[in-house]
Image (cartoon, rainbow, N blue to C red):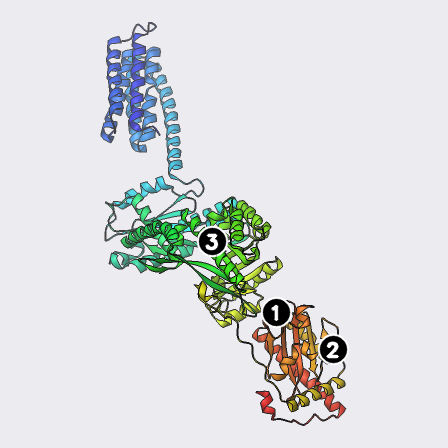
Amino acid sequence: MISNRATLAVFYGTGGLLLLLVAHSTAWRHVNTALLDGLAGITLSTAVLLSCLRQLRPALMHVLLITGSAVIALAVRAADGGIPSGAVSMFTVWVVVYGSLFLPRRQAALHAVVALGSTAIALRLVEATESALLHTALLVAVVGTMGLVAGALTRRTRVLSTTDPLTGLLNEVGLSHVVAGGLIAVDECTPGLLLLIDIDHFGELNQALGRDGGDAVLQHLARAYERELAEGGSIARLGGDDFVVWLPSAAALRPELSRDLDGTSREVERLITAITARANGTFDIDDIAVEVDVTVGAVLVAEGRSASLKTLLQRADTALRAARQADLPVRLWHPALEARTAESLKLQAELRCAITDGQLRVHYQPLVDAHSRQMRGVEALVRWQHPRLGLLTPAAFIPEAERSSTIVALTEWVLHEAVDQAASWARAGRPLRVSVNLSARLLAHEGLAAYVETQLRRSGLPPELLMLEVTESAVTAQPRRAAAALAELRSRGICTALDDFGTGYTSLAMLQDFPFDELKVDRRFVANALNSAGDEAIVRAVAELAHRMGFEVVGEGVEDEATSRLLAGLGYDLLQGYHFSRPVPAVDVLALDCAPTPQVARTLTPAQEQARATSADQHATLIDNDDPILRELTAVAARVIDVPVAMVTLIGKTEQHMLAPVGTDSFSMAREDTFCHHVVNESDLIQVPDTTADVRFKGIPIVKSGPHIRFYAGAPITDAAGHVLGTVCVLDQRPRTLSAVEADVLRGLARAAAARLASRVDAASIQPLPDLVDAPSLAN
């Protein structure tokens, strides 16, 4: 943009040239040539001097404008009327336009009055009164119009140069003017506060809603923050999803801030949280409920004269990055953070050497079957055995590594180590699928699939024993490239998983487009599922969605048995968390045993078994295979527990009698080929979450050959003497676990079935066999 000095130099230069033209034109011989030459010399010399100046001070600018008005009036007089005087008088427009461009309105109006007044007087001296008045009126009209136009354009230009076009907020230029003025009044008694606000996961949100939807979110937040800062503050958008709030007097909002600047961290954070909480939250964008969270870096300013916006923004950015690394919503800048930032940069430089110097370690955390609790795989998690700082977890160095190409070398190293280790386990007869996290940078790499396949061939690991995990943010950063890379991996038999599902803005349509094999639900939902109805609904819905789309579903962050039972009951396939094991070195993996020890069935004495089996066979002869009451009981069992098959069984001497089956035909089986004969030695319900993982059952025909039963649960039916005659049982072709309510329902149905059998005994007037042993011994 042209400066006020350069504009004034052009004004004087062109004016001088015009005066020379008028003075020496042969058409106008009546002009005062000597005076015009003298005025031209003055104006041209002034133009040269202005071009040599670096800066035009305000006082000198006013002097030159007044001088210019005087030169115009003198030149009008020297031109001696007519066209020459009219031409020279038009230079009054320059004075008015210049004032509109570079001066406040009052000062510009004053200079316009001086210029027009002096020119009008000069015109009166060289022309008749009527002609001079007409000439002056025309000049005022032209000059006034030009001044108004120039003023409007100037104000519009200033607005455009200082305002963000999308939100109407200040931009960085406008903010710099505001902050520069506000810093003058900042001191220890009236501290200022600058907030750098960044929207969490805005890239994923923008991808899910589209560019227009993302713009609508920014506009909504802009209006919300403007309402919160209606008095005493300014809000600006720096571009992207970064907003800046400037509070020139934070003490005016919270007076206690002025009392002790060294102890205000909590108070400032409470103030910031109050501001952001009221502006954020859930709102609708095109009928979609969008929840927006932000992370804030803050700087408290106690000495304004030595500060600048650039410095404050750098400090706020440092605080913002520290907040993200610590997973905090707000962080106040402190000098120690600069040292921490320097330490992070140092770690990043050292990490490059650590990769080649053998300082990295890979630990493995098991992924267990949600039902059998047997270990089905492990996740590879990198650790850094730092020579100075000890063993570092990924949180200490991965965030910095992700900001550079170091993350690519680090991921390749982890993949190399994990593939070799999984191949070693497979050769030892313990095949475990190993999961490796892929960085966003590596996912976008053109040769990813070929590189992974090379590693598999080199190590001899079958592709089905490798799972590559990617996060939502990695997928949504470059969705087309990610979809192509995942499709290429699948074409080579390599499985992929979507990690931390639920933390970003992955749309269901996008999820359908990506060829994932596994969905890992983020720990924040899993950890609160027992205590939050909302989180429980989320983990339930995700499990149903994942299975409908053909994905296995994994619950991360399982910390206790209650949560593991809940997820198993909701149909989760795999579980991961400290409840089963922390990440351990490779040498300790095969020693892990996450599965509970199966209960050992108690063996009845021959006399006990003869009494029990005889009673069961006698009851089987008394009850119809399609008894209506038992049929109702099994129908309730199938409906409430949501299984395809339910039945009443009686376990005789050599076979199992099947009564009132739902979901299958009635037939008899050899008792050794059934699940239910294990119940006769127990006094309570038993369940087998995954029959293929239980050594007692994985070889029986209905598991091994068909119909491939994976889940069994049975509650015992007892007679009056305390003999366990059989069960009310349910079966499913998918592994699962009963909830506490479902288990109680099954026990209640077994008691109802026992009552029905007892009524048939009474009707037939058959006495139960005398108990040959102590009934309590069977009931324990």
Q: Is residue 32 left or right of residue 751?
A: left
Of the residues tagged 1 and 3, which is closer to the observer?
3
> Where in the figure is residue 229, as x and y percent of width and height?
37, 50
Quadrant, the C terminus: bottom right
Distance, label 1 to label 2, CA atoms, is 23 Å
Disc 1: which residue: 692
- Judged from the image, the secondary structure of the residue bearing numbered disc 1 is helix
Q: Earlier in the sequence, mark 1 or mark 2?
A: 2
Residue found at x 72% / y 75%:
661
- Residue 604 lies in quadrant: bottom right
Of the residues tagged 3 and 2, which is closer to the observer?
3
- Residue 153 lies in quadrant: top left
Viewer can see residue 431? yes
> Where in the figure is residue 134, as x and y percent of width and height?
37, 17
Question: How many other residues sit within 10 Å of disc 1, few (<14), some (14-19) or many (≥20)?
Answer: many
Disc 3: which residue: 416
Question: How many other residues sit within 10 Å of disc 3, few (<14), some (14-19) or many (≥20)?
Answer: some
Question: How many other residues sit within 10 Å of disc 2, few (<14), some (14-19) or many (≥20)?
Answer: few
Mark 3 residue type: His
Mark 1 residue type: Thr
- Judged from the image, the secondary structure of the residue bearing numbered disc 3 is helix
Front in this rendered view, residue 59 or 767: 767
Q: Is residue 452 left or right of residue 387?
A: right
Viewer can see residue 200? no
The numbered disc on residue 668 is 2
